[in-house]
Image (cartoon, helix red, strand yellow):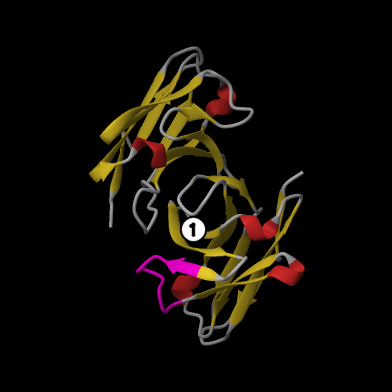
Amino acid sequence: EVQLVQSGAEVKKPGESLKISCKGSGYSFTSHWIGWVRQMPGKGLEWMGIIYPSDSDTRYSPSFQGQVTISADQSTNTAYLEWTSLKASDSAMYYCARVSSGMASDLDYWGQGTLVTVSS
Amino acid sequence: EIVLTQSPGTLSLSPGERATLSCRASQSVTSTYFAWYQQKPGQAPRVLIYGASRRATGIPDRFSGSGSGTDFTLTISRLEPEDSAVYYCQQYTRSPYTFGQGTKLEIK
């Protein structure tokens, strides 16, 4: 069974750093791109970027380029989303999802989401 | 960036009725690279339709997708109470692979 399990909710202060994770199982982790999607409170889905765990090839949305870092660790089947200096506007639910086939494809399996709250 | 505009913003229908949700792209999208998702409150989204018209695994045949170019449609025939959700379209023709803003479907 394909599963993506994300790390737990985080409460941080502005300016702090954060790295959240997404662990894949039940499939060949290095054979599928993994994407990250932001959902701000009460709002829609925003595509942030994708990574190919096999070689760490990464593509970012211009809206998120330079604001976050997407990475992956083949040895642990885990993808990451990282901030070096959080802002209140980073408060949102973040989902990881598997890209079904190739780089340009639908997101067929999703993690449960990680809620990030940034507040002083 | 390709902007996807969904309409209507909210749709309120009764069980058994038919729902028609629209998604218009700011530039032509290859239909192979177009999907629809359903998101219920407190849940992660799930893919319903990919390749504009292909149902994902386990999706009932009440859900169907169509369209090409800049205009795409998700049709839900014979609405059931559990279809109450927000529906999003997504294009993955050109990065960034943008989503529409969503259509909220309410079942009366």
Q: Residue at x 61, y 63 (%)?
A: A115
- Residue shown at 49% from the left, 39% from the top: B37
Q: Is residue A17 magenta?
A: no
Which residue is under mark 1? Answer: A41
For the residue pair A82 and B43, the one nearer the viewer reads as A82
Task: Evaluate whether residue A9 shows in this view.
Answer: no
All told, the count of numbered labels is 1
Residue A23 position in % (x across, y down)? 71, 62
Please tell me which residue lies in front, A53 or A12.
Answer: A53
Name the spot of residue A14 as percent of width and height, x first.
52, 84
Up/down of B84 relative to A74, above or below: above
Relative placement, left or right, of A81 versus A112 is left
Q: Is residue A18 above or below residue B35?
A: below
Image location of residue A40, percent across then percent down: 47, 60
Magenta extent: A58-67
* Tag 1 subunit: A
- Can you give x and y, in whole percent of width and height, for residue B102 in the image? 40, 42
Kindly report the secondary structure that dominates the magenta region of the rendered protein: loop
Give the quarter of the figure containing the N terminus of chain B: bottom left
Mark 1, Cα crowd under 10 Å, few <14 / some 14-19 / many 20+, is few
Q: Nearer the viewer, residue A69 or B105?
A: A69
In the rendered structure, the answer to whether residue B12 lies left or right of residue A53 reads: left
Residue lying at 43% horizontally and 36% vertically, measured from the top left: B104
Which type of secondary structure does the marked residue at label 1 adopt? loop
Q: Amino acid at mark 1?
A: Pro
At a point 51% along the width and 69% down the height, the residue shown is A57
